[in-house]
């Protein structure tokens, strides 16, 4: 069907070109009769026949080009097309104004050819600028929108500090974890939360996984993003910026943080280390969770229930309500019992906090 449309369009173009230019060719030919020169229908038919014969060779390449352009446009994000179209309109407007000014020169070549060249050139440049500078345009709109903070609970919000202007890039682990939404709702997070499109793609693949656990995690991550968009708190910016030369998502996050002068928010211990090696600041939710946990010092007594045995010989393992692991020396014999222990040391890392303890007087406490 598309090929027939292309061939019909070439017929119309051929007829039009025949009416416009074939009379001049007829004039140059000594074998052409006078009635043929003055008959536009003959010129239109000849032009249409020439273009139709030409379409037998060029129709397929034109159809393939149209399908290729259609595929590219359908895959392009809507904001890319929006900003590209706006840039195209601005370029064409500038070309029109320039052509209007040049028309006063009354030079045949300039007034007839140059407007077409300006329209093509400035239209192309406008589309490219709007398409490639979409992130800067969106950030400028966001900055203008938030230039005057809204009043909340009757009091005017304070001006954001300089550090709050940083972009905070979220990775997949911190979105699936879900605590980011609770932290954002408290007002402790400021600035802009950036969600890259490649992270959204990875999250969608997890949500579409055949494994029920992964599918549940992926859907929870999508729900968390929806909550971040609807609740009061930091604004959410979904960016389409990608790095085709990088395959690993972690490295893409690091590159994006460098390009946006932002921070990476994650729960991934390995990503934390990679970002540190690249000199990119990291906000680790586990570090925050450990920071707000109750402080435990060596010598403090605790009452815990030994759940299972530890990795080392004769060790027992217990857990606090917040999930902190307690490794109990000589606690294997107390599995299933509630005992009083004395903290001997505390180990805190980005992966979590671990408490080492020993039974108080080596005795089993009374179960409560």
Image: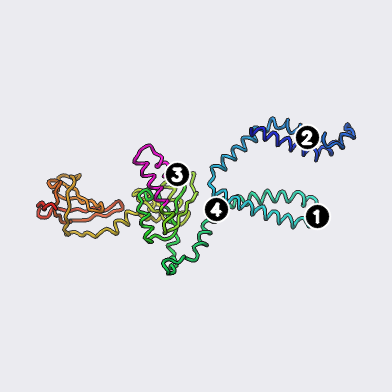
Q: Which residues are magenta?
A: 203-226
Q: Which residue is mark 4?
A: 134
Q: CA distance from mark 4 to mark 3?
A: 20 Å
Q: Main secondary structure of the magenta part?
A: helix
Quarter occupied by residue 310: top left
**SS for callout 4:** helix
Of badges 1 and 2, the one in the foreground is 2
Q: Which residue is mark 1?
A: 106
x%, y% of residue 178?
36, 51
Left/right of residue 8 with respect to residue 338 in the rendered view: right
Left/right of residue 26 with respect to residue 235 in the rendered view: right
Q: Determine the residue positioned at 19% across, 59% down.
A: 298
Q: Which residue is mark 3?
A: 201
Q: Determine the residue positioned at 68% across, 30% down.
A: 57
**SS for callout 1:** loop
Q: Is label 2 in contact with label 3 (beta carbons under 8 Å)?
A: no
Quarter occupied by residue 258: bottom left
Chain-order first, disc 2 or disc 3: 2
Q: Which residue is mark 2?
A: 47
Chain-order first, disc 1 or disc 2: 2
């Amino acid at each position: 069907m598309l090929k027939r449309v292309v061939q019909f369009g070439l017929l119309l173009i051929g007829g039009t070109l025949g009416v416009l230019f074939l009379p001049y060719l007829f004039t140059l030919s000594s074998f052409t009769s006078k009635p043929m020169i003055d008959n536009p229908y003959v010129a239109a038919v000849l032009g249409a026949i020439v273009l139709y014969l030409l379409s037998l060779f060029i129709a397929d390449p034109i159809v393939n080009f149209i399908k290729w352009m259609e595929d590219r446009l359908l895959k392009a994000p809507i904001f890319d097309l929006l900003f590209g179209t706006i840039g195209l309109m601005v370029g064409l407007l500038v070309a029109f104004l320039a052509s209007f000014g040049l028309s006063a020169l009354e030079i045949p070549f300039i007034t007839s050819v140059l407007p077409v060249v300006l329209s093509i050139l400035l239209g192309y440049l406008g589309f490219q600028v709007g398409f490639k500078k979409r992130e800067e345009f969106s950030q400028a709109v966001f900055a203008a929108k938030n230039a005057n903070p809204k009043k909340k609970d009757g009091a005017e919000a304070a001006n954001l500090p300089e550090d709050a202007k940083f972009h905070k890039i979220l990775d997949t682990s911190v979105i699936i974890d879900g605590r980011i939404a609770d932290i954002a709702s408290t007002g402790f997070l400021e600035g802009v939360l950036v969600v890259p499109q490649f992270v959204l793609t990875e999250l969608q693949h997890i949500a579409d996984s055949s494994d029920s656990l992964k599918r549940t995690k992926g859907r929870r991550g999508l729900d968390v993003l929806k909550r971040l968009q609807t609740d009061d708190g930091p604004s959410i910016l979904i960016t389409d910026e990608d790095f085709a030369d990088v395959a690993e998502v972690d490295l893409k996050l690091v590159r994006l943080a460098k390009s946006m002068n932002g921070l990476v928010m994650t729960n991934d211990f390995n990503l934390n280390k990679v970002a540190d090696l690249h000199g990119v600041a990291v906000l680790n939710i586990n570090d925050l969770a450990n920071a707000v946990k109750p402080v435990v010092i060596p010598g403090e007594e605790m009452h815990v229930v030994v759940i299972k045995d530890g990795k080392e010989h004769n060790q027992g393992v217990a857990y606090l309500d917040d999930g902190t692991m307690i490794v109990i020396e000589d606690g294997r014999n107390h599995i299933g019992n509630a005992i009083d222990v004395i903290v001997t040391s505390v180990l805190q890392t980005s992966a979590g906090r671990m408490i080492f303890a020993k039974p108080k007087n080596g005795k089993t406490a009374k179960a409560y």
